[in-house]
Amino acid sequence: MTASAWTEDRIDRLRTLWLEGHSAARIARELGAGLTRSAVLGKVHRMGLSAGRPRPRGASAVVRSPPRDRRPPFTPVSEAIAGPAAVPNQGRTTLLSVRRCECRWPFGDPKAEGFSLCGRPVERGAFCGPHAAVAYRPVRQTPESLEALAGLH
């Protein structure tokens, strides 16, 4: 059986440094003898020292802003279809230059030289409003389909 790295002196020193607010990495460096940050955190947890600990030294209160909804606003399909003139007939971007928030509706043959993607701002899924209206068709709900969905059939 191997001897434990946690002697009574080390445990006392760990408790003192932890309650003073030192980081686990710094405590591991101070205790030395091959102890890691993870070993210190494990011992702190087993000793039940993590509750009620003061803020670590040098840490300031972090003020976080509320999370932003990064999704584009949803446009209902009925509003997205403004007529045939609203749907562009040629792309603004290529496969290599399309950005994350640009419509990926393809124009032409992917093997042809003039192949492009729409490139307008995304409104729903991966497409602009007019292309989303074509790509995402609403599901027609009948009483039978709802019963099947609920498992009543």
Image: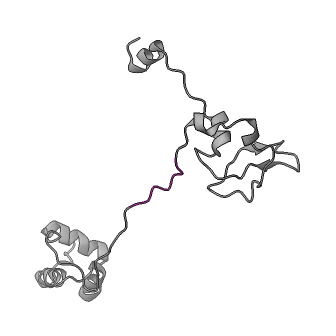
By secondary structure, the bulk of the magenta-drawn segment is best described as loop
Residue 1 visible in the displayed image:
no
Tell me where residue 82 appears, x and y as whole percent. Answer: 67, 38
Q: Residue at image x 83%, y 42%?
A: 108
As displayed, is residue 47 above or below residue 6? above
Tell me the quarter of the picture where residue 46 sits: bottom left
Q: How many marks?
A: 0
* Figure quadrant of the C terminus: top left
- The image quarter containing residue 34 is bottom left
Residue 17 in view (yes/no): yes
Q: Position of residue 139 (x, y in %)?
A: 54, 25
Q: What residue sits 29% from the left and 81% below the top?
A: 60
Q: Quadrant of residue 143 in the image? A: top left
Please indicate whether residue 15 sits to the left or right of residue 26 in the image: left
Q: Residue at x 32, y 73 (%)?
A: 63
The residue at the point 40 percent across, 60 percent down is: 67
**In the image, is residue 104 part of the stretch drawn in magenta?**
no
Q: Is residue 130 left or right of residue 17?
A: right
- The percent position of residue 26, horizontal first and vertical second, equals 29, 85
Which range of residues does the magenta coloring cover? 67-73
Tell me the quadrant of the picture where the N terminus can be found. bottom left
Q: Nearer the viewer, residue 34 or 107?
A: 107
